[in-house]
Image (cartoon, rainbow, N blue to C red):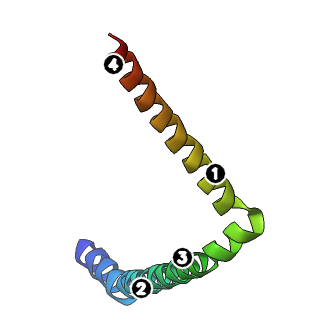
Amino acid sequence: MRNSAKQMTDKVRDDIVEPVAKGAAASTEKLAKGSEAFAEGARKMADKTQGWADDMTGASRRRNLILLALGLTLLGAVIAMLIRSSDS
């Protein structure tokens, strides 16, 4: 009886479980490759349209103005420190 149950278990594993597991693994691998390709395509599209989007929203102009303001603030701080140090 035990030998028969072992044979049946081996047959189910060989005929059903292993092929299903192999098929699922292959499908998962194909899905992962497809997702990677989709993500790469989306990244390339975003890179190509970034300049256009910045122009449409004014983000590049705002970014440049912020950088200019920071630069002028830094320059003013350095000049103020130089004036204070020369007064002493």
Q: To which residue does mark 3 refer?
A: 43
**Figure quadrant of residue 19:** bottom left
Q: What is the three-letter code of the residue carrying label 4?
A: Ser
Viewer-closest of 67 and 40: 67
Up the image or down, 72 lies above or below 40; here it is: above
Residue 62 in picture, x, y percent from top left: 67, 54
Q: What is the three-letter code of the residue carrying label 3?
A: Arg
Q: Residues within 10 Å of mark 4 (few under 14, many from 20)?
A: few
Per the model, the C-alpha gap separating discs 2 and 4 is 87 Å
Q: Which quadrant is home to the C terminus?
A: top left
Picture residue at 27% right of the left edge, 82% below the top: 7
Q: Residues within 10 Å of mark 2 (few under 14, many from 20)?
A: few
Q: Earlier in the sequence, mark 1 or mark 4?
A: 1
Q: To which residue does mark 2 refer?
A: 16
Q: Residues within 10 Å of mark 1 (few under 14, many from 20)?
A: few
Up the image or down, 59 lies above or below 69; here it is: below
Q: To which residue does mark 1 refer?
A: 65
Q: To which residue does mark 4 refer?
A: 86
Q: Secondary structure at mark 4?
A: helix
Q: What is the three-letter code of the residue carrying label 1?
A: Leu
Per the model, the C-alpha gap separating discs 1 and 4 is 31 Å
Judge left or right: residue 79 versus residue 73: left
